[in-house]
Image (spheres, rainbow, N blue to C red):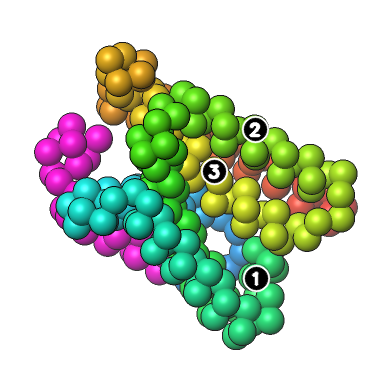
């Protein structure tokens, strides 16, 4: 919406949302405990910045979806390796130090960027189209969920696999909602789709916040 509908371009969109991401991250790091709205605002800023960076890498720099995805996969693995070397864990459920949280958000930013590149690779380069790509990724995500509940496969490994897969799922689903019917989309446009998804996100955050408060009361009663 920002880069195309509002004609800001990829670079300007990157500057806007990377700046917003860094400001929100600074606020997030200054707070103690989990604050759902601050967390998800930071996450959303990283997701939008990641989308713009992916398009800039793949299209403006001309590296293409496959090479762009390969570079981002390598970057993510390097971040996780450094994170593990420094903290002896990459378990996102136990972020105990500021350094671990910085690694956490670096990994999320790169994974968000990877998601758009991988999603476009599935939809365009492999020719699956937006809807079919979203369905294929959904099936893989369901398999990951089943592995989590019914096997002893590492929960940390499954988390990172699932997290990376949700990025191309979001990218292909977003394209399916926004692109024209001639390109296999629903032609809802970027503005309408963004509003609908934002409303769903706000509802989910409010629900999560309520459940967290109920859990806290139960644990301390």
Q: Are marks 3 and 1 in contact (CB under 8 Å)?
A: no
Q: In this image, 95 relative to 122: left or right? A: right
Image quadrant occupied by the N terminus: top left
Farthest residue to the front: give it: 126
- 53 shown above or below 182: below
Residue 195 vs residue 142, the one in the foreground: 142
The image position of residue 55, as x and y in percent, is 27, 48
Residue 177 vs residue 61, the one in the foreground: 61
Q: Are marks 1 and 2 in contact (CB under 8 Å)?
A: no
- 34 shown above or below 117: below
Whether residue 27 appears in magenta in the rendering, the answer is yes
The image position of residue 167, as x and y in percent, is 48, 45
Report crowding for label 1: few under 14, some 14 to 19, many 20 or more residues within 10 A (C-alpha): many
Residue 166 badge: 3
Magenta part, dominant SS: helix
Q: Are marks 2 and 3 in contact (CB under 8 Å)?
A: no
The image position of residue 193, as x and y in percent, is 36, 25
Q: Label 1: which residue?
A: 90
- 110 shown above or below 51: below
Report crowding for label 2: few under 14, some 14 to 19, many 20 or more residues within 10 A (C-alpha): few
- 205 shown above or below 136: below
Q: Which residues are magenta?
A: 1-29
Give the residue displayed 43% in from the left and 46% down from the top. Answer: 118
From the image, state whether disc 2 or disc 3 is nearer to you.
2
Q: Label 2: which residue?
A: 139
The reply to whether residue 50 is visible in this rendering is no
Give the residue displayed 47% in from the left and 42% down from the top. Answer: 168
The image position of residue 148, as x and y in percent, is 79, 48
Locate residue 130: give its quadrant. top left
SS assignment at label 2: helix
């Amino acid at each position: 919406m920002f880069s195309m509908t509002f004609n800001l371009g990829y670079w300007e969109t990157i500057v806007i949302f990377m700046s917003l991401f860094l400001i929100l991250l600074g606020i997030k790091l200054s707070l103690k405990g989990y604050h759902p709205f601050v967390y998800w605002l930071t996450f959303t800023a990283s997701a939008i910045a990641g989308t713009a960076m992916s398009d800039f890498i793949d299209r403006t720099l001309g590296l293409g979806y496959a090479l762009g995805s390969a570079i981002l996969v390598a970057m993510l693995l390097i971040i996780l390796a450094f994170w593990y070397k420094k903290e002896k864990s990459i378990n996102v459920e136990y972020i105990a130090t500021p350094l671990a949280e910085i690694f956490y958000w670096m990994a999320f930013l790169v994974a968000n960027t990877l998601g758009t590149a991988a999603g476009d690779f599935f939809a365009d380069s492999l020719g699956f189209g937006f809807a079919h790509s979203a369905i294929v990724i959904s099936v893989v995500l369901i398999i990951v969920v089943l592995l989590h509940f019914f096997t002893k496969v590492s929960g940390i490994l499954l988390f990172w696999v699932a997290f990376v897969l949700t990025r191309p799922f979001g990218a292909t689903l977003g394209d399916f909602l926004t692109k024209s019917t001639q390109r296999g989309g629903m032609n809802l446009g970027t503005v309408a789709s963004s509003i609908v998804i934002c409303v769903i996100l706000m509802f989910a955050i409010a629900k999560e916040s309520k459940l967290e408060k109920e859990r806290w009361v139960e644990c301390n009663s």
